[in-house]
Amino acid sequence: MSAWGLLRLRQQLENGLPLTPRPFQTLAERSGLTEEQVVHAVRQWQQEGLIKRMGLVVRHRTLGYTANAMVVWDVPDQRVSQLGAKLAEARCVTLCYQRPRRLPDWPYNLFCMIHGTSRGTVQDQLQQLIDTHGLADVPHAVLFSHKAYLQRGGRYASRS
């Protein structure tokens, strides 16, 4: 495989997988590689940790989900993994992860994102999570977004 072909492939991957029946074949054609070379390179980059994961970037506002809230929780450390796993299974939670607290100003260590078509819908979903998982006494804050920032995948190659 040529170094230039691999660089072109990395640049193509920054734009995401093409929406074609055979995205790796399309990437191969755009990069001057074979489909097999593309598959091999992607697997190798995953094994090396250059590509940590491949997933979708969903532009939720375009789909009508304009009320988006990050719910931050102050969960006892011994409970955070178990509760995080339960919240992540909820249909209304689109992502859930643990972060370290930043005391004294930021006591929250569990974050979950809820997207909805209205603030009322999001608040109803949050209340259902609280009721289902017995979280009435767990301190939390609801942070609604006011702006949609650029969403994009990883960057793998220099443009200079």
Image (cartoon, rainbow, N blue to C red):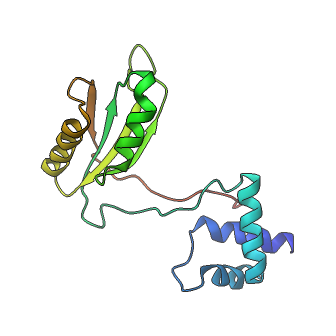
**Which residue is situated farthest in the top direction here?**
104
Res 138 → quadrant: top left
**Which residue is situated farthest in the left direction here?**
120
Query: In what quadrant of the picture does the C terminus appear?
Result: bottom right
Query: In what quadrant of the picture does the N terminus appear?
Result: bottom right
> What residue is drawn where x is 45% and y is 23%?
78
Left or right? Give the position of 154 relative to 59.
Answer: right
> What residue is drawn where x is 82% and y is 72%?
4
Between 115 and 89, the residue placed more toward the observer is: 89
Left or right? Give the position of 154 relative to 102.
Answer: right
**Which residue is situated farthest in the right direction here?**
2
Q: How many dots with numbers?
A: 0
Residue 56 coordinates in the image, percent (x, y): 48, 64
Residue 147 coordinates in the image, percent (x, y): 31, 49
> What residue is drawn where x is 55% and y is 59%?
153
Residue 89 coordinates in the image, percent (x, y): 36, 49
Between 83 and 4, the residue placed more toward the observer is: 83
> What residue is drawn where x is 67% and y is 84%?
25
Res 118 → quadrant: bottom left
Left or right? Give the position of 18 relative to 27.
Answer: left
Q: Is residue 58 above or below residue 135?
A: below
Left or right? Give the position of 155 relative to 79.
Answer: right
Res 33 → quadrant: bottom right
Q: Is residue 56 above or below residue 67?
A: below
